[in-house]
Every structure is written in structure tokens, then in C-alpha cells.
Image (spheres, helix red, strand yellow):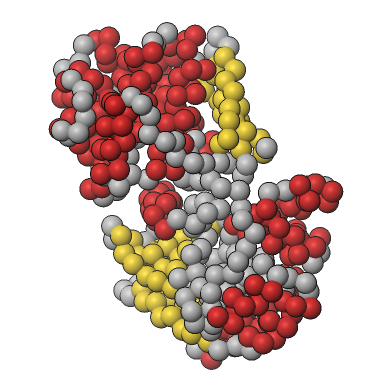
Amino acid sequence: MRIAILGAVRANLPALEAVLADASSHKVDAVWTVGDFAGYGPFPGEVIDLLREMRALCVLGSDELLLLKLHQMHESAHRTMQQEFAPLRHAHAHLSEEHHRFLLEAPRQIELAIAGVRVLVVNGSSTVWPSHKTTLEHLRILADESHAQVVVYGHGHEARTHRIGGIAFVNPGSVGQSHDGDPRATYGILTVTPRVVRTRFIRVCYPVEAAVAAIGERGLPPSFATALLQGALPDLPTAEAPPQVPEEESDPRVRAVLELARSCEYEAEHTHQVTRLAIKLFDDLAGLHGLGVGDRFLLRCAALLHDIGWVEGQQAHHKAALRIILNSPLLPFGERERLIIGSVARYHRKALPAATHEHYTVLTEADRRLVGMMAGILRVADGLDRTHRSLVDDFTCSVSPKKIIIKCLVHWPAEMERQAALDKGQLLESALGRHLAIEWRLA
């Protein structure tokens, strides 16, 4: 089977028409688009209409999710929205109810079996502020869950293919808004047979002047036109900045922990988000677990170090984190503190504490209970940032004799976070003797 794969059309109808004509000359069997097709350009409705006419397989990207959020709001509220929404207001104004229904019904990812090959089609954006590292981590998680052999993804505007852990990752680049200095449209042709998976990237000339003229006629920023002519990233209104990493603190032990984390090239935004959530969860549940200030500090250190094992690769990175913590000369901790911090970090994912784990069995019974409690907290906190997008702004905990309800305030739909935290909540449920429930609502 031969498939035309399209990324980041960005409401650029002339570019889409040229690409589809070229794809037809290659006798493709299907057309897939991996999101970000309806925003930022002058022809949002026309692009959707053409994709529907072609019976293209479409998954939603961050542009379409933002458009849906705008559509759910009253028009008078748009003026007070964060600046990140401003470039999409034009698209929202030029989409019909039928277009919005199409977006509402479109999936965020699709799993297919082609010629015996399992394929995942997804946008792949892990954050409103794209990060190549976190995108790949997110994709690896999705690929593992779907058992995909090929992942076709968007976001990033760069045509590339790479293989990680036996999984082929393919990004077709951008049809409508090139960022690499070449103004031509880019797309890919994916060929899948029982024995071969092959990708070819194609550059296509299109009437850029027509898209530039439409940008002016429809009142879009002139920088959009300049960007199309230059094949460059357009100057966009500045979005609200993602959460900032806290400055180093006066405690030399925390500085040492952060030094080790940096030496392992840790993912700062995700790590500090998980740490923030873990400490808040510790504080909110203090009446149940009865732990003290010293325990809180150890949890904080474990949260800051929980993902440092990524420096050795994704596989078994939780075990690598334990090994690094136990042996690093950078940490000013004694053996007991290292064992507790390392064990909590080690149990942030995968297996629960077990008598067959040597580092765990050498702990006293009291310290094992401590590790179980704090690892349970860390697992839930890590689940609440499953997509590494820092979606959870705040939460409150409601406690009853049988249940703990974590009510999250989020700035983006966070169903993956909710489900991941529930999936990882078994240890905390066991430690506290209560069922865990997690809810989210948009800010």
C-alpha cells in the first residue's frame, strides 16, 4: 500500500492542492494528514472541505484542539484569551458549524494494521511549546501502548525518519508552512508491504504568491506572508510561557541534587512539574500519611531525580536512576538516605516494591513503609504529567473514609493524565487504604 502522508497544512490551500496533485501522479492509495491542517493560514474551511472530499484520514493536532476550545467559549471571551489563541481566531471565524462538527468527531490518534504492520497515526505534539525531546518520549509511550511498528506523526515541520527500539518513526514535514528555508511544500509517501516499510520525502513547488495574496486579503499578519516566501518560522504573538524551573535554592543538598540532575541531562520542565505535584500531594494528604518534614525533603529529592536514568536510555531508566543515586559522588547523603531516595525514584514506574529487590529488603520495616507511601505519591504525580505538557495547574484533594478524590484544574484537556495517574495509583491506594479517583476541569 502506498500512502501520501501530510503534515502541517496550516490552512494553505494552494500548497495542499499542489501536493495532492503530485501525490496523485504517484498513484497513492490513501491520504493521511497528521494534524495542524486548519489553523494559521487563510483557507481553513477550504482545506477541511478538500480533505473531506479526498476522504483523507485526519487526526487532530494542537491547532485543531485550540480551535475546538475557542468554539466552546462565548465570543466575548475570546478577547481575554491567552495570546497563544490570537492567530487562530481568524480560522475560528471562517469555519462553519459543519467544519466544527468535523473537528469534534475527528480522532486524536488512529491505530491501523496494513499488510500485517501495526501503524499508529498521531500528531505527536507534547506541548504547546514544541520540544523535540519530549515529543519523542511521548511517542515512545504511545507506541508501546499500541504495540505499533510504525509511528507516523506531525509537529515540528521537519521531514525525518528514525528508528528507536525497533519502531520506525516518520514525520512528513510541512505542506503549508516550511521552516527550513525552502518555501516549497513537503510531504511523504509511505510504502507498506508485509516485508518492507519505506518512506520517500518529496518537495513540491506551489503558487506561493496566491497564498501570500490571500493572507493580505483576509487580514492575517504580514509576517505570515514573509514566512511563506522565506520558508521560515513566522513571528507569532508570544504565548504564555510554560512553567519556569525554580532557581537553585540555598540548601546545598538541593543544589547537589540539581547538579546531578543536570549532569544527567534531565528534562527540567517535566521533572519540576512532577516534583511540584508530588509535594502538593504530600502536603494535602498529610493528615492520612503522618509523615514529617524530613520525609518530605527525601520525597522532593527523589522526584527531582526520578527520571535521570534516561541518560542511559528509555529502557529500565527507573532502575538506572536507582543505580546512579546509590553511587554518585555528587550527592551528600548517607547510605540510608540514598536507599530511600533511590528506591522511591526506582518505583516511580513499572514494578511495585518486592521482597526480591535487594535494595528494598535491606531497609527497615519502617523505611519500607515510608518508601511505599512516597513512591505511591510520586507515581500519581508522574501520571499527572503523563504527556510532559504541564497541563495540571493546581488540584485539591477531597478525603473520605473510603476514597481520595483529586480534583485537577487544567488548561488543556487532560484525559491521558487522569487515566495514567489512576493506572499508577495502586501503590498509593494500598498505602492509604482508600480508593483513588481523579477528576479534571478546564481553567
Residue found 57% across the figure and 20% down from its top: 397
Q: Residue lying at the far front in this picture: please name it.
A: 250
| Quarter residue 252 falls in | top left
Residue found 64% across the figure and 72% down from its top: 223
Q: Is residue 274 above or below residue 231?
A: above
Return the x and y of residue 308 as percentages of the image width and height: 29, 40
Return the x and y of residue 238 as percentages of the image width and height: 61, 56
Q: Is residue 3 above or below residue 22?
A: above
Horizontal side of residue 197 vs 220, given as left or right: left
Please give the count of numbered marks on the rendered protein: 0
Q: Is residue 387 above or below residue 356?
A: below
Give 26 or 280, whichever is nearer the viewer: 280
Quadrant of the image for the N terminus? bottom left
Q: Is residue 89 above or below residue 208?
A: above
Q: Residue lying at the far right in this picture: please name it.
A: 76
Residue found 16% across the figure and 20% down from its top: 335
Give 409 or 262, whichever is nearer the viewer: 262
Return the x and y of residue 67 as percentages of the image width and height: 70, 57
Horizontal side of residue 206 vs 5, given as left or right: right
- Residue 295 visible: yes
- Residue 440 visible: no
| Quarter residue 370 falls in | top left
Residue found 49% across the figure and 57% down from its top: 130
Horizontal side of residue 160 vs 12, given as left or right: left
Return the x and y of residue 244 as percentages of the image width and height: 49, 41
Q: Residue lying at the far bottom in this picture: please name it.
A: 25
Quadrant of the image for the C terminus? top right
Give 104 or 80, whichever is nearer the viewer: 80
